[in-house]
Image (tube, coloured by chain):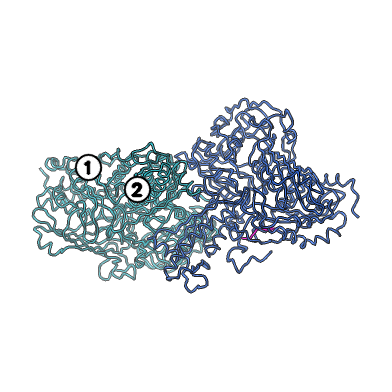
Chain colours: A blue, B cyan
Amino acid sequence: MKENGTGKFAAVGKDIARTDARLKATGSAMYADDMKLPGMLHGALLRSPFAHAAVKTIDTAKAAALPGVKCVITGRDLPKVNYGNWRLFPETQDEYALAHDRVRFIGDEVAAVAAVDRDTALEAVRLIKVDYEELPAVFTVDESLKKGAPVLHEAFPSNISIDRKISYGDVEKGFQESDYVREDTFTVHAVSHAYLEPCSCLAQADIDGRITLWTSTQTPYIVQCLLASALGMRENDVRVVKPYVGGGFGGKMELRSWEVCAAFMAKKTGRPVKFTLTREEELATGRRRHPMKITSRVGFKKDGTLVAKDLSILLDGGAYNAMGPTATFLCGNFGAMLYRYPSYRFLGQHVYTNKPPASAMRGFGAPQSLFAAESQMNMAAQELGIDPIELRIKNAQRSGDEIPGVATISSCGFIESLEAVAKMSGWKKKRKLLKDGRGIGVGCYSFISGGVFNWFNTQYPFSAAEVRAFSDGTVHLLTMASDIGQGSDTVLKQILSEELGLRMEDIRITSADTAMTPQADLGSWGSRVTLMAGNAVLNAARQIKDQLFGAVSARFNLNVIYDMECRDSKVYPKGRPNKSVSFGEAVAMVQKAKRGEPLVARGYYTPRNKGLVTPAFSFGAQVAEVDVDRETGLVQVKKMWTAHDCGTVINPVSVEGQLEGSIHMGLGYALCEQFVMEKGKTLNTTFLDYKIPSALDMPPGESLCIETYEPEGPFGAKEAGEGLVSPTAPAIAEAVCHATGYRCKDLPITPEKVLKGTASKAKRS
Amino acid sequence: MKENGTGKFAAVGKDIARTDARLKATGSAMYADDMKLPGMLHGALLRSPFAHAAVKTIDTAKAAALPGVKCVITGRDLPKVNYGNWRLFPETQDEYALAHDRVRFIGDEVAAVAAVDRDTALEAVRLIKVDYEELPAVFTVDESLKKGAPVLHEAFPSNISIDRKISYGDVEKGFQESDYVREDTFTVHAVSHAYLEPCSCLAQADIDGRITLWTSTQTPYIVQCLLASALGMRENDVRVVKPYVGGGFGGKMELRSWEVCAAFMAKKTGRPVKFTLTREEELATGRRRHPMKITSRVGFKKDGTLVAKDLSILLDGGAYNAMGPTATFLCGNFGAMLYRYPSYRFLGQHVYTNKPPASAMRGFGAPQSLFAAESQMNMAAQELGIDPIELRIKNAQRSGDEIPGVATISSCGFIESLEAVAKMSGWKKKRKLLKDGRGIGVGCYSFISGGVFNWFNTQYPFSAAEVRAFSDGTVHLLTMASDIGQGSDTVLKQILSEELGLRMEDIRITSADTAMTPQADLGSWGSRVTLMAGNAVLNAARQIKDQLFGAVSARFNLNVIYDMECRDSKVYPKGRPNKSVSFGEAVAMVQKAKRGEPLVARGYYTPRNKGLVTPAFSFGAQVAEVDVDRETGLVQVKKMWTAHDCGTVINPVSVEGQLEGSIHMGLGYALCEQFVMEKGKTLNTTFLDYKIPSALDMPPGESLCIETYEPEGPFGAKEAGEGLVSPTAPAIAEAVCHATGYRCKDLPITPEKVLKGTASKAKRS
């Protein structure tokens, strides 16, 4: 890993142990399901057994009569308020907490019970009688788009709930001027977030009817607002607190049925109500990555110069929109990234099907879109007779590139990444010399550092932080940014530590409590936290410094032209540490000057003048080497080489962890994870049947951080670890093709497909 | 009760139900002892069986070996840091959490145990072996001040730990010019706070070694600071949270042994540690009101005009200073209140004895000092042949009076109070016509609205409040002010409700959490909260209003000379509600003008230019009618009439509750409550033996609020309910004398004393 300019930074770039590490390692961290409140009830959900049905009547009498049952509710008990994350466009808000008159997938929530214990709640659920009228259902985008197909939502008779377009340059002219044009269709499948902690929440109503909801979420502010509106309450009569969260990966960023039910039943019963999902529920009914059908036409000059691209994607959204609108736009955006496309056209269509809704998942449209784009790049390279890495470098985006009307790339280490993985992996030699059954392939990615588009229609800045500085030399950082296991509490402390010249142990952090931490933060998704909350922290810290500098200047009667700094828990004019006071003493001076008022500052960040997508793009390249067993079709990844540009690295060991997690997820996506479904019913609902790579499947790897300096990021930092989930599948697909000649265009690359695909191919000599 | 200007105020002056009423009535309020944390240990204390002894050796081996015991500590394990509330004068800080080499009263803490359950902890305590060397002990101030008396603290060889003086005018000349001089000595006794909730705390250490302490306290900030210093930690590495508190009355305003032990053992074991005292521990070893020996010489002109007073008081402080230094000053201050003394001299001396430390208790020096002063006034009236109420009115303090060098009385409704109780009780008629065995007497008080003197040496303003205003029409009030059952959360919400024109249900309050609520607040004592925290709330609210007014002025293009107001959840120019926007809309406008930044303001209050004592004095008078059984000596109070000037009444029903509580406490003080002690050992350690008046003992009463407008108080409010504890005892003593001729100068007025005192007296005809 590259030197992180240790001479320049004191805390940034250091392998600082995570703030929550010991607590989690010793089992002391309190997750939502660990919480117990006096008189607490346990909730359970009745879910639809049909993929599509009208709900005629629901009889809850027997359930309600079961001893120990305190509350049974159906959709009719709840306010009829639809919700969904795309609050800016209310027509996209297509969900109710419990079905009103229709269920649209197997697992759709129909009724909820709160009882004195979980067993009683489950027994009561079984006693609820629902009279359904089954309706015809659709399970693929093709079925859904057929003429006369059953309609899932009356407002969208075509079953297309959203379309998004991007267009620049003259694509038709581009294809005419191309020497080589190819069109391919790729299909990618759904996978589970498989976070370690299943969804869980605990709601408590106070005596004024206010709700406190502890919930395993990535987006406390979104849950607060939507829960309030779903229950007809005022936003600030709902308090959402995020306890420790065992992963989210995009699957915990919406208001969910059980959160509404818990809050509603807590108000109704006057007792706290907890819901915790089982792994079976999560796998059978939970959110997942969008399956997509991707058709891409791309034109090159003979020398490999890209000329035009026409991309159309059908997203299989499942029964509701969830985060589909964002994915629909982003997969088109990612299709235009990495390379200089003089002309580009994208049409994305989000299609309803009678399956559990797909939503955001690590990569957010990129893994699908980039599997297609990067595979196609590899296929074109082969046909053009150009080395895939060379073809990429020829067309690669660079710092300052503009995607017309969409974004400007302010920092870009893509070419350096490509050169690095080529060198690290011994690319040229291996491409030539590897024997049959052994192959090497490349895949690349670009990713966002948070989104610019305000789909949630927040009224607040995108991120906020409050810093309270004390005369004992400590500070308290308050932020609604949500650490969901990715380590943002640690990174934000590091950023503050760097800016204020304090040690990590001098900083107390309180995060993600909508009543206590400053309004607001849009949550942890799209790799937005380090850049956005980091900038808010810096903004607050700089206000603190201004005051400290003023006090120290007054104390030493300093010339106003002196620049000053906070370092080593001291405040002094740059280069004159002899004129220093301790940080705490400087705080006391500011306080004295304000007759005791504590030193507090609030900082904010909202990306402005940053196009439609993101304030900053990250880049990276990955090479996979595989071994394919021609007898069984089994693909084994032998080694991974990764180089990625994430700007300044704040915490190298955390970035390393993110990289390993990405490879692990990418491996599952490429080779083995998939939902086995039959007419909308998920058949593999345990981790025995839903195949996630084990630790033993993890290949060794080498990696390099290409450090650029992102001008919009805190200390030059940008996204790290989310984009990295994308290059793995196309790299492995290319390596398999290199090893066997078999080109997989429909993930995952199962042994069956490899066997079938290689049966007719001659062995490479 | 007087009209509260309901035309003028919307929320102030209204009988608004307490914010915590339903929660407490339904048993849902969480007190410290109700809290449970995973892995929590239970603590117990070993206390000294000797009133005075050297601690030679402590053997904890057997205790530590008991299964289930996780930690045993003695004073030698703790940092040797002495503590005490009078931080401004470190020489007064005379306590250690656990004895180092000496114990000074029966109950002094010697060792602490943390175990998996309370029974195990208690068993372990019994297994600790201490080798004591008993020392001679003193139990009264007279014994303690004798030459050659045993010395309790080496730094104070006289056993006088503090003396306080007040002096103005020429007292000697005053007595020379007096026509009538009398000198009396009174003694008053110790009583228990008898709060419903015994002391309890729960400490948890976080992974960085920071401590969170939930504790039943009146002063979270004081506990935070002193606990940090006792454990060698930084102030802000300690977080103190006040859960619901079941009363304090001055008995929970210091750092206490079990708080230090819980925090220390939580750090040491890595597990939460809880301590909860028993009622027996509270009664045998807890804080109490100071016994005092009061000698007062007072001189009058023939016509009753006061000329001079010379007051000297010996406070029986018990083994440590606790809040004794404040009581020592205040009893001298209260001696100078109520009447115009042209010359006054006071010497207070705080004396150590080998008994549980006395400390602050409702009234804080006033009940003792005023029992003497008011009794003496009654005695003088009798000898001068002037009606006691008339004598008082003649000399009464009035608005604008100055106590030289000490205080200015900015508002005073004392004369009105005297006139009112005279009228309400039918004073003149009853003084003449009541039959033998039946009597009527008067007593008066003045009290403070918080203290000015910064004995804790806080670096912050005395009170602070943060108001966050939201576009949904709600606000969040954050303050470190501590509701200990007196209702300050409700009163502060009412003040904010009034100032912002919002309803009570529009206001969320978070209070008394040193990490989350704004720095700082000195706590709930000396009736400081309504005035001081109330002013901080107003200060914050006015900043919010300034911003709202600006936005609305801009929206309607208003002439800058318009005054504006917040009322009925709207903001508009005064008298022009047609130009109004809703409160929430106005907040949204301010936010928009700052590109989304939330509307937040912090307000502070510190009394300045307000003399040495308090920003505002309250006054009142009380008449008691009693029936004395001449066979048994039993005194029954038949009725009480009270008139008191507490400035503007914020919440009448709360003030009524305070009044009833005061009479109840005053009754116990006057007639029946006392510690029965033998050589420093308390014999009555249950509520069966320690006699508190029951509900059946409560006399009917009539009361009147004399509403003045206190310019320094929020909406004109000042102290209510604490001062009222003082007049009851002198009023009853006078009534007993009126009924029987027996003058009690040593509280309590027990049947024995009455019988003995009346044996020789002729019956009144």
- Counting from the top left corner in percent of width and height, residue A385 is at 84, 54
The image shows residue B271, relative to residue A350, as above or below, that is below
Q: Is residue B298 visible?
A: yes
The image shows residue B23, relative to residue A611, as above or below, that is above
Q: Is residue B258 left or right of residue A135?
A: left
- Report the magenta residues as a range: A644-652
Residue placed most toward the observer, B51 or B661: B661
- Counting from the top left corner in percent of width and height, residue B578 is at 38, 36
Question: Which residue does the numbered mark 2 point to in the structure image?
Answer: B687
Residue type at the position of mark 1:
Trp
Residue type at the position of mark 2:
Phe
At 41% across and 55% down in the image, what residue appears? B220
Give residue A207's quadrant in the image: top left
At 80% across and 51% down in the image, what residue appears? A301
Residue sticking out furthest to the bottom: A578
Question: Which residue does the numbered mark 1 point to in the structure image?
Answer: B641
Identify the subunit bearing mark 1: B
Helix, strand or loop at disc 1? strand
Helix, strand or loop at disc 2? loop
- Counting from the top left corner in percent of width and height, residue B235 is at 45, 61
